Image (spheres, rainbow, N blue to C red):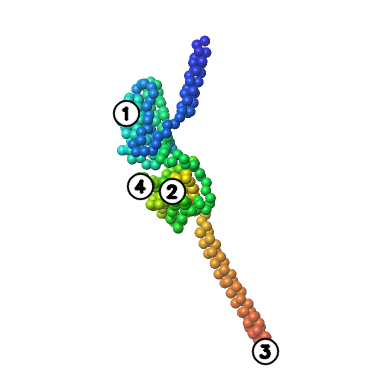
Amino acid sequence: MEAVQKDRWYLLVLLFLTFIKVALLQREVETVRLEEGMVLSCLCPWKGNLSMVSWTKTFENNPVAVFHPEFGKSFSHRYRDRVEFLRTSPLDGSISIKNVTHQDIGNYQCSVQTFPQGPWTTDIQVEDLDEPPSFNITDTALPEEALAVAQLVEEENNATIRCIQPHNVTIYQVILERKLREHIWNIIGVCKQVEGGLVSEDYSDRGRVDCADSLEVSLHLTGIAQEDSGFYRCTFNTDVGVRTYTMKLNVSTPGGFSLKLYMMYVYIGAGASAVLLLIVILILAMRRRKQSRRVEYRVKLHPSQKQKWRQWHRQ
């Protein structure tokens, strides 16, 4: 009887944990505006003793920030001197971030470890909400228009990727991104107008990002390598909507196929074949001419001399 009661109790615990897991997966994610000094709230709803608070950002290996009541605080190198724990209550893990950039956009997760209740987590999505609310997002464009606003220029070992202002629209902001992994885009550069001034943000690990007064963004790559291959896209925030244009950069490996190298080999092979054919023709022509001269010489000889010439030739 006791074994049956234990099994029922175990089953109830499993059902309860499953319910909690589903509830956590279905909870709404809070959205926070990207702005200077933004606050990411993380206030545990129950009482208990705090063991640790940790903040992580999706797709990043290292934590953003960690707080431990005994060992203190620890920050990732990207967030050092920019993140502050607010600590308004014993179980408050909220943080504020200063000197914000567009690289701070994304999903953050706060985990509060407590005793005896256990862990509590919450998710926060940081977005740039300065865009006009009437924007309609469009990801397609005519080939002619896409070619005019997103250009890829390759010159020997260098390449330039340009996001050029579309015609007949007012630009508020231009973002140049690169696709690192499936469905993940990384911001390389941002160019925007803020209170009448030009703001340029360069996050590229490779090359240099330039921002023109006309809000045109360019990425200059010197000594391009295989790691530069991939998809790049230009996103324009305009008065008529958000326009996105994507381009692809292909960089062949040193041992891979190269059209220029292939054509050079073709031209060298064709030239060598032509020279060899000409040499063979000249040799055959010289032999034929020599044989014809021998025949002419034999015909001109006197019959008595022909016999001597034959005997001398046989010797």
The amino acid sitting under disc 1 is Arg
Label 4, on which residue?
A: 196
Q: In the drawing, does residue 207 fall left or right of residue 6?
A: left
Please say if the residues under marks 1 and 3 sit with CB atoms less than 8 Å apart. Answer: no
- In the rendered structure, which disc, 4 or 1, sits on the residue that comes first in sequence? 1
Please say if the residues under marks 4 and 1 sit with CB atoms less than 8 Å apart. Answer: no
Of tags 2 and 3, which is closer to the observer? 2
Determine the residue located farthest toward the top in the rendered image. Answer: 1
The percent position of residue 270, horizontal first and vertical second, equals 56, 65
Q: CA distance from mark 1 to mark 3?
A: 128 Å
The percent position of residue 111, horizontal first and vertical second, equals 39, 29
- In the rendered structure, which disc, 2 or 4, sits on the residue that comes first in sequence? 2
Of tags 1 and 3, which is closer to the observer? 1
Of 251 and 273, the residue lying toward us: 251
Residue at the spot 41% in from the left edge and 38% down from the top edge: 129
Residue at the spot 54% in from the left edge and 64% down from the top edge: 267
Label 3, on which residue?
A: 302
Label 1, on which residue?
A: 87
Label 2, on which residue?
A: 170
- In the rendered structure, which disc, 1 or 3, sits on the residue that comes first in sequence? 1
- In the rendered structure, which disc, 2 or 3, sits on the residue that comes first in sequence? 2
Residue at the spot 45% in from the left edge and 58% down from the top edge: 155
The amino acid sitting under disc 2 is Thr
Look at the numbered disc 4 and give the secondary structure of its residue: loop
The amino acid sitting under disc 4 is Gly
